[in-house]
Image: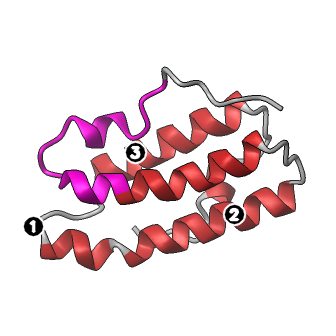
């Protein structure tokens, strides 16, 4: 089973932008890490992977209000950072899922 690239910084743009509260960035990271864990376990079934991506995306959707309560929002820089991170993960594990499909449940 392949391990994820430990040198890759998840959500790098969000991590380095003070507009995004650190504790909320960590919550998003934890959701993304659940996808990484599934892939590290050797899952290759695209339906199973997409289900996990949908679960992750819906949970990120649920964080929008908390971002707003902390004078932030999941806006362009956050959307891009999340998409870049997910794209890297899918490439790393050689999973052929289009980005629009991978994040199809997003409402941000």
Note whether 103 is above or below 99 in the view shown.
below
What SS does tag 3 mark? helix
Residue 3 x %, y %: 70, 29
Q: Is residue 44 left or right of residue 108?
A: right
Q: Is residue 64 magenta?
A: no
Q: Identify the residue position indicated by label 2 in the image.
A: 52
Instruction: Check residue 9 for magenta coloring.
Output: yes
Indicate the position of residue 27 as horizontal and vertical percent values.
37, 60
Mark 3 and mark 2: Cα distance apart in space = 20 Å
Q: Which residues fall within the magenta stretch?
A: 8-26
In the rendered view, does 18 fall on the left or right side of 104? Answer: left
Label 1: element kind: loop
Location of residue 87 in the rendering, given as x and y in whole percent from the top left corner: 59, 39
Of residues 13 and 6, the one nearer the viewer is 6
| Residue identifier under label 1 | 71
Q: Nearer the viewer, residue 107 or 13?
A: 13
């Amino acid at each position: 089973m392949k391990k994820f690239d430990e040198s890759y910084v998840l959500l790098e743009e969000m991590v380095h932008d003070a507009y995004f509260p650190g504790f909320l960035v960590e919550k998003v990271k934890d959701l993304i890490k659940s996808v990484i864990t599934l892939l590290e376990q050797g899952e290759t079934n695209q339906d199973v992977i997409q289900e996990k991506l949908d679960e992750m995306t819906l949970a990120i959707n649920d964080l929008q209000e908390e971002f707003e309560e902390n004078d932030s929002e999941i806006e362009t820089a956050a959307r891009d950072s999340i998409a870049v991170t997910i794209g890297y993960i899918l490439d790393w594990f050689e999973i052929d899922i289009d980005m629009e499909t991978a994040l199809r449940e997003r409402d941000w």
